[in-house]
Amino acid sequence: MLDKSFNPAEAETEIYEKWEASGAFEPKSDPDADPYCIVIPPPNVTGSLHMGHALNNTLQDILIRFQRLRGKSVLWQPGMDHAGIATQMVVERKLAEDGSPSRRDMGREAFVNKVWQWKEQSGGTIIKQLRRLGASCDWSRERFTLDDGLSDAVRKVFVKMHSEGLIYRAKRLVNWDPHFQTAISDLEVEQKEVQGHFWHFKYPLENGETYEFPIEHDEGGKPTKWETRNYISIATTRPETMLGDGAVAVHPDDERYAAIIGKKVLLPLADRYIPIIADEYPDPELGSGAVKITGAHDFNDYEVAKRNNLPMYVLMDEQARMVASDIMPAKYVGMDRFEARKHVVADIDALGLLIKVEDRVIQQPVGDRSGVVIEPMLTDQWYVDAKTLAKPAIRAVRDGTTKFYPENWEKTYFNWLENIQPWCISRQLWWGHRIPVWYGPDGEAFCAENQSQAQVKANAHYGKETDLRQDEDVLDTWFSSALWPFSTLGWPQETPELAKFYPTNVLVTGHDIIFFWVARMMMQGLYLTDQVPFPDVLIHGLVLDENGKKMSKSKGNTIDPLSMIDKFGADALRFTMAISAAQGTNVRMSESRVEGYRNFGTKLWNAARFCEMNDCKPVNGFNPAELEQPLNRWIIHELALVAATVTDGLDKYRFNDAAQGLYRFIWHVFCDWYLELMKPILQGDDELAKAETRSVAAFVRDQVLILLHPIMPFQTEALWGQSAKRNTQLITANWPEFGSELHSEQDADEINWLIKLITAIRSVKSEMNIPAGAKLPLLVAGASSQTKERLERHQALLKWLGRVISVENVAELPNSALQIVLDESVFGLVTEGVIDMSEERDRLAKQIDKIMAEITKIKQKLDNENFVARAPETVVTKEQEKLNNLEQKLAKTRSILNRLG
RNA sequence: GGGCGCGUAGCUCAGCGGGAGAGCACUACAUUGACAUUGUAGGGGUCGACAGUUCAAUCCUGUCCGUGCCCA
């Protein structure tokens, strides 16, 4: 006997272990089975499961289980990435907490060993948590981006791209994170709006020269009054960088400054002279229209400096402290940039050169991991020529080889790829793939897959054995992630897995990493394998809190998926995700919703329990297409419909449609009606009907378990195992493929008619304040022979569910009966007491109003000549039929009301 | 400034050219018989506003208002 309800805490672990031990997560070896493969978006090795992961992995697992049930050879390829910055940060912090020597104190090799130790002990929590969610990944194939095989792939790709000129080294301005002391890519920089200042300085002209600067204008904008100036006014949000100015720029069309272009100004504090140059960059409308140019610490200035061959002075070290140099006044050396800012402003002020300070909202770039202000720095870094790689990646989506679901994300994808910048891939970290480049004593670079190959190249170059040192830097983590769909399958080796499962079938991810990851996989996949890595990209929404806000630790509004699983079970959480995940929409998570879908699971549990109590067991050789009872043919018909809905929904990534269809069918069709309607049959004495009904109930229950399994795997597996002796676990059962032989419109009409009649009887009683339990005789007038047959056939059901004592055909209904119009017949409920005639008249009048309102609407349409002439014939016929039915109903209801007087 | 999205029942959201839907919440009634993690019945919407296309618009187009996200 089944327990009273499902206990997820007890059952889930056991079920999961059984699945895994049975090898169900591994691809089928059957060579005829179609392959189906998804690679997991690799979580950070430092990560732990949050709601975003829960959504992402639930959707993947639903697809994986669905395709597995359909008989495909399924691989869900799991793994993690090494998360360079995040992991290094975690371990460094831990070293500090433990009072251990710092990273720099212990040196590179020792530190990297520490990180590996940490990874073995504490990394990968998320993998265990994914199991709790029910993720049916093939864990025997788990991969890590720093595994030997994947690292080989990385080196091979680097060497290939380097030899083809797609990877190169260059000295450029990069986003420098002074906290982690590494370069980062554009994507890892966030623009934050903060309250800042705009400082206006005077830079005096050389040799005390002067010019006339307009200070008043007429309505036409012509200057009417001038003043004599011996300085140029500039404004800046970053005063400390003035020490490295190479020029002051004005717009060539700016007449105010035309006279002094080419002259020099004294750079205060630095005591250098710098030129006033003309360049298109300054906006005459902004500030004074004159801009200081610090080529080594600002991206815009960098371009101006390059165009005009201005010197670029590096002002800071890796930690953004002012660094000693020819141009750096000694007093600032060693100061942090923000401290230096204060001093520069004070010193300028002391010289009488500070004009004013404005408050201003400024865009400040910050590192996405560190949160500190990014410093543009002039350094040597390695770059990928992303522009070249982007072209095939754009084409593949343009021509539909890869499609996004929903489609509108393609625009985002194109937009970014079409404006793509060189990708800075080197990082000044220790945790990651070390760049496979070695340098000779003179700085000559030798790129090779390993040191000995580099050595061979170097020896040939120098003509003798020469000492080499390897590049200190590692690669951006995303460089290895970009190879994930094929490196995890064994590439560059030609493995059977690669042949079978690549390209993968679909990539499931959030829109936040379309640039970071999806686009880069497309680029690398096409470049290295000549194929797109996946034909479908499913972009799902974010998980928000119940107020529609992004969940974040700092806001304290996170809901922990594991606590939801502890409380309500993984199935409830998964169902919530599935039914909320309409294509492209965000998911608002609230505990009460999860609770509600836990209740849905319990409803199914109890339905199964009821089946069990009534001895409903699968019957060998059962054929759903050969049944006697209309009720049974009806539920099979409904089952076939919902099976089609679920299959179609999952095929089209419409998880909400699939979940909604199941919810409706299980609760409101199977439980509310079928199980109720079968009760009188089971209590009756028609043994054949009983046996058939039992076998049908068992069949429908089993099919429902299969259909629901992708979304609610644990509970369905538990019910599957406990409700009958089975040859296989549910996870490897066969997905139903019902054909039209199971459709039966006639039986659907008949049972739906019965349901309508029962509902109407209940309704009338409720409206007339007659206790629902009161058993009343039912009369019927004007019944067609079909109705008479149906009444005869379903008398037992009617009596049970409609609380009817008897059913009798009469010529005319007495006025004392409560009357119900259904199709051609009028039914009457005979009450014991005297009914309140005025209340009954109100009830009927209300119905008549409703009918008339509908009739008016339809007549309006049919009276419109254009409608009749232009609308499709089927639409017109349908409207005409509707009108006829309504008019019939109206006439009947009116005559009842008339007779009541 | 550019791009993407959203505004449908009290709340959360599906639907998206021909009958306004679901879940939750609410109201009334019921109930120890698969299920109170329940049942039955019910109330509740000019589908953001305006204009256009169409025989027909919640759905398509445009404008506006409100709101969210991404990029610069």
Image (tube, rainbow, N blue to C red):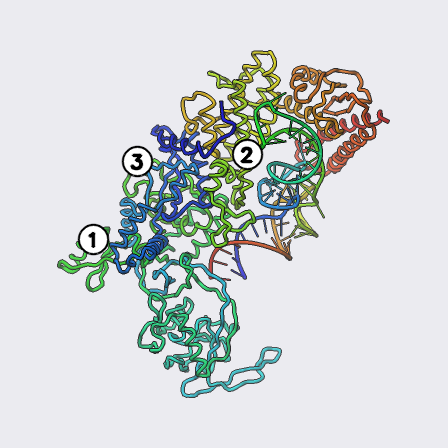
Q: Which sits in the foreground, A891 or A59?
A: A59
Badge 3 and badge 2 both on one subunit: yes
- Reading the image, the residue beneath label 3 is A496
Quadrant of residue A774 in the image? top right
Q: Residue furthest right?
A: A901
Q: On screen, A448 above or below A663? A: below
- Where is residue B60 shown, x and y percent of the image? 60, 46
Seen at 84% across and 26% down, the residue is A900
Disc with the residue nearer the chain's start (1 vs 3): 1
Q: Which mark is residue A599?
A: 2
- Reading the image, the residue beneath label 1 is A451
Nearer mark to the viewer, of 1 and 3: 1
Disc with the residue nearer the chain's start (1 vs 2): 1
Q: Residue furthest bottom?
A: A208
Seen at 45% across and 28% down, the residue is A718
The subunit letter for the residue under badge 3 reads: A
Residue type marked 1: Gln
Seen at 51% across and 45% down, the residue is A584
The answer for how far apart the CA atoms under marks 1 and 3 are is 30 Å
Q: On screen, A348 above or below A608? A: below
Badge 1 and badge 3 both on one subunit: yes
> Tag count in the figure?
3
Q: Tell me, yes or no, if residue A198 can be seen here.
A: yes
Q: Say which element carries label 1.
A: helix
Tag 2: Cα neighbours inside 10 Å, few (<14), some, or many (≥20)?
A: some
The subunit letter for the residue under badge 2 reads: A
- Where is residue B71 shown, x and y percent of the image? 47, 58
- Where is residue A721 shown, x and y percent of the image? 44, 25
Asked whether disc 3 touches disc 2, contact meaning CB atoms under 8 Å apart, the reply is no
Tag 1: Cα neighbours inside 10 Å, few (<14), some, or many (≥20)?
A: some
Q: Which mark is residue A573?
A: none
Residue type marked 3: Pro
